[in-house]
Structure formats: C-alpha cells, structure tokens
Amino acid sequence: MKRLHLTLLASLTAFGGLLPLHAAETHAVTMYPAAALTPRDKRQMADEVKQGEDAAAEVAKQLKLVDDKVAQARLNLIGNRLAAVANTQAFPAEYGNDRVFPFTWHFHILDDKAVNAFSLPGGQLYVNTGLLKIVRSDDELAGVLAHEMTHSAHHHIQALSHEQSKMSSQMLAGMLVAIFAHVPARDLSNIVQGAQLTQLGIMNTRYSQTAERDADHGGTILMHQAGFDAVGMLTFMERLGDFENSRPQIDAGILQDHPEAAERVSLITQELKDLNVPVTVSAVRHVTNAPHALTHPAAGGGQDIVYVNRSLPTLSDPDGTRTQAIVTQFNTLLDGGLQLYQVGVRGHSVLVSERPLLTITPADVALHPGETLESLAAASAKALRSGLYAQNFPNAMGASAK
C-alpha cells in the first residue's frame, strides 16, 4: 500500500501553473458557471482530470474495488448531491484556491478495513469499507465525502506542487501520501533519512495540517450548502477522536500529518456556529441515527415496547394506540436530552422527570401471571434505564446503538 501511493502520487507532482492562494473571511458562496472558465482554467482542469484518471487506473490495478450495488448507489446519491454544489459554487478556501472546475466526480469503494477515505485530483474519491461500517447516517457520510471533495475542489495537490522546486520529488511524494492517502506518519520513515526526514516533517506539519483544516472547513460549508445536516461532520470527527484515544499513544512529532481530533472538533464546532447550525441533542441524535423506542405486536392482544434491544413487559393494548402514545412521548423526550437519572417509578407508574410515562393496569398484570402492578412498573423502568445506559455506554454493555 505504501509503495503504491508513492508511485501514484509521485506522478502528480509535475503539474505547474498554480492560481493564487485565497483565504476567505466569510462563508458566502459564489455561483460560478462553467462558461466562466478561461482557457488557462480549462487547461488546468484537463491536467487535473488526466492526473486523477491515470492514478485511478493504477489504483484499480493494485487495490481491490468493491462491487456492492447498494453501497455504491448510496455513495453516488450523496456524492452527486454534494457535487452539484461543488461544481457551481465557490466555497471559501483557507488553503489552495476556490476556483470552480466542473469535474465529473467518481466515487469508489475499496475493500479495506481501515477507517479511511482519500481523493485524487480531478474528482476521483475513494472510501474504504471500514469507514462505511462506522458512519451512522447519510449526513455523517456526506461529511466524509465533503471533506475529501474539498481536497480536490480547492486544488490542494496543485498548491503542494508549488513547493516542488524546494524539495525532491521523492520527498514531495511522501508528503502527498501523508495528506491525501492518510498513511500513518511512522510509515514515512523509510522515505528519506537524516536532514531530509526533518525537512519532510516540517513540510508535512506545515502543509498537511493546513490542507486538512481547510478540508474540514470547506467540507462543513459544502455539506451545509448541499442541504445535509453539518452536525454530521462534528459527530463523525468526535468518533474518530474516540478511536484516536483508544489506540496506543505514539508521539508522531513533526511527522504528525493531521491536526489532533480535539482541535478539529473545536474548529468544526466554531464553523457550525458561524453557519448558524445549532448543535442540539436532537440534531446529534438524528445524524448519529440514535435509537428510538419501537412497538411490536405480542400474543394475547398485547404490545411490546423495545428500546436498544431491551423489551418492557408486554402491555395490554389490542389496537396499539396506547403503546404508540407511550413510544411517541418517550422518543420526544429522548430527542430532548433524556437522561438515565430522570427515569423513575412510583407505585405502578413509570415516571420521567416526575411525570407519568406509563401506568400499569390490571389488564397488563393478566398477561403476566404471578406479577403485580408494582413489579411490572419496576421492570418497565429498569428496561428503560438499561437501554439509556447501553445507548450512552455501548462498549461497557456490549450493546448496539443501531
């Protein structure tokens, strides 16, 4: 994998003719029709497309692409929605430039368990199966794609090529690996030695982290403009931070190729504030596909309420209206930030914030021989609290949040 990226990306360093760097101070977007391209723009766009196509051909030869029609259709649907904005609107760049090129975007899936995605010039994007398994909603996946699309749309690889005159193509290729293929810093140590390694580290820190920050910044704006809930960028980055914290801590020093997740979370949070996107409990639950309670018919004219794989005692409810009302109320409370300690029991009623959520009836007890009004209420409260705990601490309980 390491050798592949060095081969692919070294071929991308020959591009010249950069446009000026641009750092915008606002979040305004500018409509930019393809007809506005100058002859120089068209030449640069053709070069970027050719670079990406050549590299994509090598990827297809050396890595395993996935033929999953359902996953591919989802990727294309989300990606094309983002592309419709990226191809017509200039969203501000803090690194590279925001000159709009109407690329034909291609979205590929790689058979790789690593949580990773990367982009090549000209509209070629790759997402690993490992990443698809941990995104919890289309909004989170849109955040990943928008981040990677920003690398291409803001012409980061061309901005990096500007430094080619200051370093060997081998060194620049190594840095491109760090930025676009997200190869761990420790794997770059065999590229160069001594003073060259130090120079690579300095360049990597300066440009890689800047490019990544711009991809977070621009990607958040892009997905917001495309109508996705940009809170998904934040929640996915927070999850990456959890992964980062769970791994053995290795000091990457000057070869650290990404800003720390905590820093990125902070910057994305500020970006959402600037975009007037509220980070509410409801929004977070939506973009993380957080679980809600459901009802299922049971024997004897009863209904079961299930929450995070926990079933409450069956309730007597021949037409389902009673349990549906309970579930609707409970789910509304969940989206409002319901906490475990707020669920209690008093007599034969389950309370939430001291207000009744459900009250056990003699008809319910008839479905559970040997139980009482009070015991069924206690069992119901216990199931709800257990579900809340499992949702908040899935690793501790071995529970699924889906």
Image: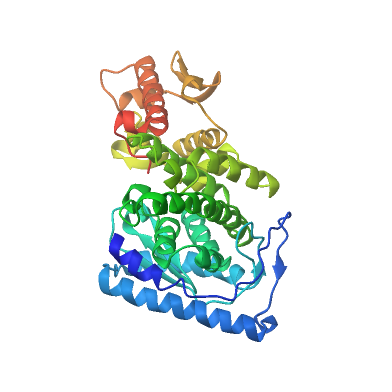
**Which color mode does the image show?**
rainbow
* Residue drawn at point x = 34 percent, y = 64 percent: 5
Residue 277 at what x, y percent from top left? 65, 47
Task: Tell me if I can see residue 320 in this picture.
Answer: no
Percent from the top left, x then y, of residue 11? 40, 73
Image height of 25 relative to 39, above or below:
above
Q: Position of residue 161 (x, y in %)?
A: 52, 67
Which picture quadrant has residue 132? bottom left
Question: Where the C terminus falls, by quadrant?
Answer: top left
Reply above or below: 351 against 322: above
Residue depicted at x 27% and y 74%: 61
Residue most extreme to the bottom: 39
Split into 4 quadrants, where in the image is the N terminus? bottom left
- Decide: is 55 above or below 379: below
Relative placement, left or right, of 307 versus 276 is left
Give the mark count: 0
Taking depth in this image into account, of 349 and 402 the one nearest to the observer is 402
The vertical placement of 40 against 392, above or below, is below
| Residue 71 image-quadrant placement | bottom left
Task: Give left or right: position of 36 versus 370.
Answer: right
Residue 337 in sight here: yes
Q: Nearer the viewer, residue 368 or 137?
A: 137
Q: Nearer the viewer, residue 300 or 90?
A: 90
Q: Which residue is drawn at 50% across and 76% down?
A: 48
Q: Which residue is outermost to the top?
A: 347
Residue toward you, 357 or 299: 357
Name the residue at 43% across, 58% down. 175
| 398 relative to 171 in the view: left or right | left
Expressed as whole percent of the image width and height from the top left, the position of residue 276 reads: 70, 47
- Rendering quarter of residue 281: top right
